Amino acid sequence: MEKIILDCDPGHDDAIAILLAAGNPKIDLLGITTVSGNHNVDNTTRNALSVCTAYGIKVPVAKGSPGPLIIDQVLAVEIHGDTGLDGPVLPPASFALDKRHAVDFIIDTVMAHEPKTVTLVPVGPYTNIALAVRKDPRIVERVKRVVAMGGSFTRGNITPAAEFNVYADPEAADVVFRADWDVTMVGLDLTHQALATPDLQDRVRAIGGPMARFILDIWAFIATTHGGLLQIEYPAIHDACCVAAMIDPTIFITERADIRVEIAGRWTKGMTVCNFEKMGGMRHFGGTASEQTDFRHTVAMKLDHAKFCDLIVDALERLTRQ
Ligand code: BDR
Ligand code: CA
């Protein structure tokens, strides 16, 4: 079983990531931590608790950072609505938050488990993860790996250059990509292949019941907001891709690269600049020799969409039956 902490900002696709993690027997969901991103942290936390309440998911939920490390808060209200999860109707949360701040929950949980057994899965801005690294750097050595939704090597979705999770806290992303741990970037290049196609929607409809309705309502809402900027035909199920990779590592083709986060660019702030080893990688990023390239990051390139859909349907069926 893969032990994970899901750090999220629900968020429509975040909610699907929660359900996939809770509904697959290969995942041991140690806890959910929340962050400001798609909406403020009060709303993302309430949404996480409501999803867990609605579908009987009994894991600790710890509330995290109310805003980015340095820049002003950026929300995705135009995509996720005024509640952060507009569209579907969820019950009010009926269980209590973990008493710890998300940052302490992450540190405690990683340190309480055997070395190299816990994977961090951030699918919102990386503020909590960066603060945890700063507060207790021992976690860098201790975690198994980080599988993060965010970034892109082709184009952005909030600016031409930047993807939302990185743009919303670029300094935090910089901390995460510079730390000496194993990071996989699951960026837009990959998640724009993880679409809720009509065929997938039909399979979910066939499951029936409130959870299937919830997922269909998520996609119906996102279909109205994801808009022309993204030029994708159906809603992207971004965040669930990271969980899917934890369940079945063969679901992506990956490549090695050196990834740097642009934190200063006037037009490119939040860009993830990828130097791919396979494409003949530049020996230097520029600057001093100490900034020499080291291809230690993994980039998700190609998704097996059929396998991905099977995992989503399988998790929803299991949770519906239980
Ligand atoms: C990311 O931004 C959010 O809106 C989604 O939940 C996802 O994590 C995609 O850019
Ligand atoms: Ca998210």
Image: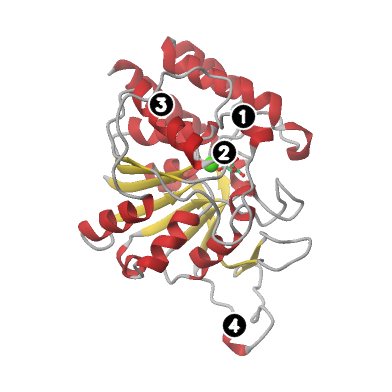
Residue at 37%, 36% in the rendered image? 21
Task: Say the numbered circle drawn on residue 50.
Answer: 3
The crowding category of the residue bearing disc 1, from other C-alpha atoms within 10 Å (few below 14, some 14 to 19, many at least 20), is some
Identity of the amino acid at label 1?
A: Asp
- Of labels 4 and 3, earlier in sequence is 3
Of residues 273 and 64, the one drawn nearer to the viewer in this rendering: 64
Question: How far apart are the alpha carbons under marks 4 and 3?
Answer: 46 Å
Residue 151 at what x, y percent from top left?
Answer: 61, 54
Residue 150 at what x, y percent from top left?
Answer: 57, 51
Question: How far apart are the alpha carbons under marks 4 and 2?
Answer: 37 Å
Of residues 185 and 68, the one drawn nearer to the viewer in this rendering: 68
Q: Secondary structure at mark 1?
A: loop
Q: Are marks 2 and 1 in contact (CB under 8 Å)?
A: yes
The crowding category of the residue bearing disc 4, from other C-alpha atoms within 10 Å (few below 14, some 14 to 19, many at least 20), is some
Q: Is residue 75 left or right of residue 20?
A: right
Residue with the mark numbered 2: 39
Question: How far apart are the alpha carbons under marks 1 and 4?
Answer: 44 Å
Question: How far apart are the alpha carbons under marks 2 and 1?
Answer: 8 Å
Task: Say the numbered circle drawn on residue 64.
Answer: none
Residue with the mark numbered 1: 82
- Of labels 4 and 2, earlier in sequence is 2
Residue at 62%, 20% in the rendered image? 220
The image shows residue 34, relative to residue 289, as above or below, that is above
Colour approach in the figure: secondary structure
Identity of the amino acid at label 3?
A: Ser
Task: Say the numbered circle drawn on residue 292.
Answer: 4
Question: How far apart are the alpha carbons under marks 1 and 3?
Answer: 16 Å
Q: Where, quadrant-wise, is the C terminus in this rendering?
A: top left
The crowding category of the residue bearing disc 2, from other C-alpha atoms within 10 Å (few below 14, some 14 to 19, many at least 20), is many
- Of labels 3 and 2, earlier in sequence is 2
- Of labels 2 and 1, earlier in sequence is 2
